[in-house]
Image (cartoon, rainbow, N blue to C red):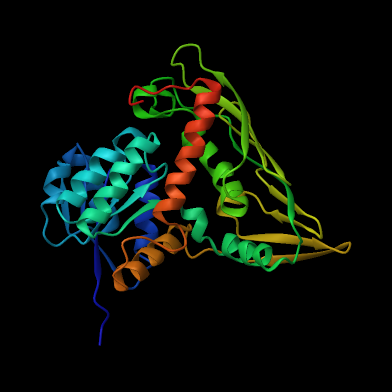
Amino acid sequence: MDKVKIKWGIIGCGNIANKFASDLALIEDAELQAVASRSLEKSQNFGKKHHSKKCYDSYDELFLDADVDIVYIATPHMSHCELSLKAMQHNKHVLSEKPLAINKVEAAKMIAMSKEKGLFFMEGLWTRFNPTFVAIKKIIDSGEIGDIKFINADFSFKSNHSLDSRVFDLKLGGGALLDIGIYPAFLTYALLGKPKEILAKSLFNEVTKCDVQSSMIFHYENAQAILYSGFMSNAKMIARISGSEGEIYIHDQWHVAQGFTLVKNGKEEVFELPTKGIGFSHEIMECHKCLNNNQIESKNWSHKNSMELISILDEVRCDVGLIYPQD
């Protein structure tokens, strides 16, 4: 008997949505039912490329499509809350691209709606489900490299975007911290939990006032993390996790790594763990597992996890003075 297909809708037809749709096609029990953009031409071009059954030029039309089971929201950061709430009001499950929201106030509304309606809701932090990260977390949780003492991770590249890009637009939630700084913050939080203290500094674009570089120190009782994100220069993006009994190096680019190196007792062991497709496939499979088990959240990236991560980012923004219109 054929598996019952889980029918997806995609809101927003930009670069991330294209990557996601490419991976969605690799999942046997997934089907792209509908896509929506504010431009019908863009929606139709995207739909043709990814074999969507329906193409809309209105997000509301997609929400009204009775055949859509779950919606992937891939619009700019500032719209994640509004669109997630609308989707759930129309009884759609939701996978919302990271960051979940602009701040913890918005995130709390989204999670409350999920619980009220009994609908699955998850932040699209695909790195959490990457086979490399899953394997690393298992090694660390087993105590193989002892207690973590230090983490060093960055996410930076020299941006070619113009100043009118959503990357630099405060109204759209632009800036390095929420766009890419969330990754090193996630890595540290996922391995060490919430820090006792956060120290942070940012450099700002003089015109748009968004952060173009942000550096963070997460201080724990017995560990520290030095983290960085920026649009001003390129980096190899290798993450280093140092324990009392060994080290792990996550290969570049670490947020979508295809493997890692374990260093212990002076010996190196290299692990190759390729992703299925680009890597979005693993969070898609997690969504399907949760839906098939009638869960409203993932045990591996829960509502609590998302709330704590956005709370950390709120604290960083408070420290550096990064304010959005939604605050």
- Could you tell me which residue is drawn at 13 percent across and 44 percent down? 60
Find residue 108 and report its image quarter.
top left
Query: What is the quadrant of the C terminus in the image?
Result: top left
Image coordinates of residue 52 in percent, x first then y, are 22, 57
Would residue 40 be visible to someone looking at this image?
yes
- Could you tell me which residue is drawn at 35 percent across and 61 percent down? 24
Say which of 65 and 217 sits in front. 217
Q: Is residue 152 above or below residue 70?
A: above
Would residue 48 be visible to someone looking at this image?
no
Q: Is residue 219 above or below residue 91?
A: above
- How many numbered marks does the figure carry? 0
Image coordinates of residue 235 in percent, x first then y, are 66, 37
Image coordinates of residue 21 in percent, x first then y, are 34, 55
Query: What is the quadrant of the N terminus in the image?
Result: bottom left
Q: Is residue 313 left or right of residue 60?
A: right
Find residue 2 and report its image quarter.
bottom left
Say which of 318 and 204 sits in front. 318
